[in-house]
Image (cartoon, helix red, strand yellow):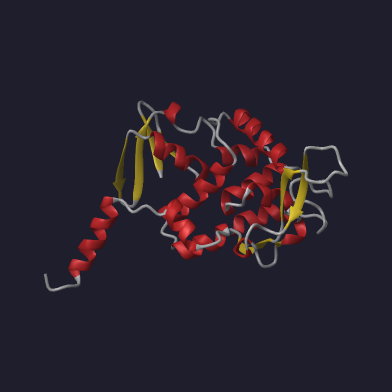
Amino acid sequence: IVLVSQGGAPKDLNLYQTQKALDNAKHAVKEGGIIILVGSCREGMGEETFEKWLLDNLNYEKLGILICIYTGLRLGEICALKWGDISLDNGTLSVCRTVQRIKNTSNARNEKTVLVFDTPKSKNSTRVIPLPSALTNILSSFCCGSECFLLTGTQRFIEPRTLQNHFKKMLVSAGIPDTNFHTLRHTFATQCIELGADAKTLSEILGHADVSVTLNTYVHPSLPTMRNLMENLASISSL
């Protein structure tokens, strides 16, 4: 997908940039399989792409953000991810726990909320996700002990609220418009659909409880898509 700014040069968009660009584009033209979005540079994602900024300033925490861009992990899942959950040999990532802050119902502590590590929200949320080889190569240079958390490289974890705040600061530093952390997951899913992923495969990668969640959230056929289907059907009939 390419963004053509008014009075500017064409700009390739990465996974993170796509959703914002689709929302802000004045109109779209498809040429040779490339979707060209016409808008303005200011309405795009800034001068420097978020992914490039992450790679140029890479550390454990930014590596975690990069993983979310290419896997659609939930906030609690990336915060609970340990290096032992990643197989560099197989190029896979296993989601087997999550962390969240919930209301404290115990009288033993005076805190209003407590952090809880638990299994994922549904049986389908416990899953194995294949990783792009380029991402696996990057991970290999940071790999450490299996009980270390991915976001820190130590046995100290980062809670979801803190990572959300750090993410906001990263956006400012990278010159990217403000958005929430869930945008990474939404953009990943939207881009997968744009690339032709079937709903069942995407549902398993995202860890949805049922494929209907994926269909209702991300799969919205357009009139041109429906028309193309009908024309293809007619081409194999006697019409």
What is the residue that sits farthest to the front in this orientation?
107
- The x and y percentages for residue 236 are 20, 72
- Residue 63, image x, y percentages: 68, 46
Horizontal side, residue 193 vs residue 65: left or right:
left
Image mark count: 0
User: Could you tell me which residue is drawn at 76 percent across and 53 percent down?
Assistant: 117
Q: Residue furthest right?
A: 108
- When the figure is inspected, residue 35 is found, relative to residue 162, above or below; the finding is below
Residue 94 percent coordinates (x, y):
68, 62
| Quarter that holds the N terminus | top left
Q: Nearer the viewer, residue 101 or 71?
A: 101
Q: Residue at x 51, y 30 (%)?
A: 47
**Which residue occupies the foreground of this view, 188 or 200?**
200
x%, y% of residue 116?
Answer: 76, 50
Residue 61 drawn above or below residue 144: above
Relative side of 20 to 66, left or right: left
Q: Please give left or right for residue 216 compared with residue 209 in the image.
A: left
The image quadrant that residue 54 belongs to is: top right
Position of the C terminus, as image quadrant, is bottom left
Tell me what residue is drawn at x 72 percent, y 54 percent: 81
